[in-house]
Amino acid sequence: MNGCQEKRVVIAYESNELDDGQENDYDNDFHHVDGTYQTWKHVFYWLFTRDDTSGQLLNRSEPHMIESTTYNEDNPIKVIIHGWLGTTQEKDGVCSYNVKSYFKMGDYNVICVDWKQYSTDISYAVAKARAKHIAKDIAKVLTRITYNLTINFYSLHVIGHSMGAHIAGFVGQNLPDVPRITGLDPAKPMYDKCGPEDRLDETDALFVDTIHTNAGQNGLNKSIGHIDFYPNGGKKQPNCEKGDKKSGSCSHVSSYHYYAHSIWAKDDYIAYRCSSWVDYEAGMCVKANITYMGEWVDMKGDNPDGQLLNRNEPHLIESTTFNETNPIKVIVHGWLGDTKEKESLCMYNVNSYLKVGEYNVICVDWKRYSTDISYAVARARAKHIAHDIAKVLTRITYNLTIGVETMHLIGHSMGAHIVGFVGKNLVDRIPRITGLDPARPNYENNAPEDRLYITDAHFVDVMHTNTDKNGFRKPIGHIDFFPNGGKSQPNCGFADKATGSCSHLKAYHYFSHSIKAKEDYVALKCSSWNDFKAHKCDDNESTFMGEYVNLNQTENYYLETFVDDP
């Protein structure tokens, strides 16, 4: 048994009573071997705003806990979680330092989580055993505050110090798509041998940044975020010699000192991407990528293959290289897909677009909803994902006033239907949607409002590559392409026998190739594959399949492909 495994006993739940008839599952707790403790009685939430900097205790008896406070849904939400032996009221604690810094800069809803009744006067091991239950309570409180994750959730940023960093990670494991988590010297004891599910990890939020200031002693040494900072090497901090004698406590708390300072003085913490402290000191990283450590970290800084859009920014693009004069391409993967896979829909097409010109290519990563769950569950979430994409695109284009005329949505498999739903959310605004072998299971017999349809954009082009198994059989766009007849594709052979997956993926291989070699995919207007093979359509209208399709042509087109490698 390692430090991540805890001896469990029978769990009994107890609820905090609210109004008669009102269910409350926010306050569940359990009986442990060493006695009874109840989360709702021992975890408190203090709201700080510019209108009340002294702090307001959130009231669990109110439906959303904020009705009688100065909470403002127009302001970003910062949630701060202290570590073992910490409290919210400490004058020099993580809450106090950061509250003051935030209000130097602007208007925020800063919520400090006070779990001192679980963190003080008890052993570290007991506090650790309670961490996931505290996180579950935080997640459910945030769900209430944000009206079931519908109001202002996009601005949520959870910040935790030491054990509080891992609690922040567990919050992310309980909530879908937390925009950002910051771990301030995440605790090492009893966490360093844990797997991702038992500590803070980059999968806990859309963006996870970590600052290591006492690595190897109180803090974890390994990289666990999308971006990890090691100021002064990450092990010991300057001016801590006396305070660090045995405990390392001075260096450990330096992480939140640095973070608080970064809020109002970002230029003081410029960091260089580097493989080690030795290389950094040797001057080997002076030409590397740079970014700010702390509040203003550039979310593209540690990701040369893409820039994570920041929901905290009004239009999500302020700190990116987005250029409003370039066309916008939005790419949405399908069930079991991923944005970062080397051979993914996103990577293939990004590489092709950037070879031929200047584009803003936005890949939508919904893998947390598309992997490790059933097809039916993913399908049930498709419209909700589309609704979010529509809202994001509205913000990026300044309420659909800038760049929308160049917008082109591209989706593969279930992603093809998702882009159709985006078009339904932005009625009569999307110039073009491309569906790459739109998924057939649980879609083909649906009414137009429940799948990709011709009315979802001014122009809808569809490519059918696996009508035998996975893809739509009938035409559903202004123009539909059936390469090699559309049922299955050349060179797929054995890979197609059971699943049809090879032919299904060929749709985005072909599209990617068309971006840089349009002449390879000339298609003829034809009524059937048999007529095409019999040369009955040789004198008919032609167009390019893929990126450069003629937007004035309609109906069904067939072609034979001789190039299938993107």
Image (spheres, rainbow, N blue to C red):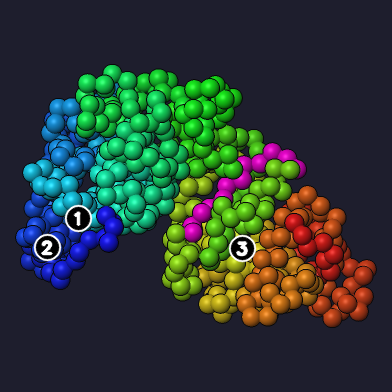
Q: What are the residue bounds of the magenta stretch? A: 356-367
**Is residue 512 highlighted in magenta?**
no
Between disc 3 and disc 1, the foreground one is 1
Distance (Cα) linking label 3 and label 1: 43 Å
The quarter of the picture where residue 195 lies is bottom left
Tag 2–tag 1 contact (CB < 8 Å): yes
Q: Residues within 10 Å of mark 3 (few under 14, many from 20)?
A: many
What residue appears at the point 22 percent right and 26 percent down from the top-left corner?
245
What residue appears at the point 75 percent right and 56 percent down from the top-left corner?
566
Distance (Cα) linking label 2 and label 1: 10 Å
Distance (Cα) linking label 2 and label 3: 49 Å
- Mark 3 element type: strand
259 or 264: nearer the eye? 259
Q: Residues within 10 Å of mark 2 (few under 14, many from 20)?
A: some
Residue 155 is at least partly visible in this image: no
Task: Write down the residue under mark 3.
Answer: 412
Q: Which mark is residue 70?
A: none
Task: Write down the residue under mark 1.
Answer: 129
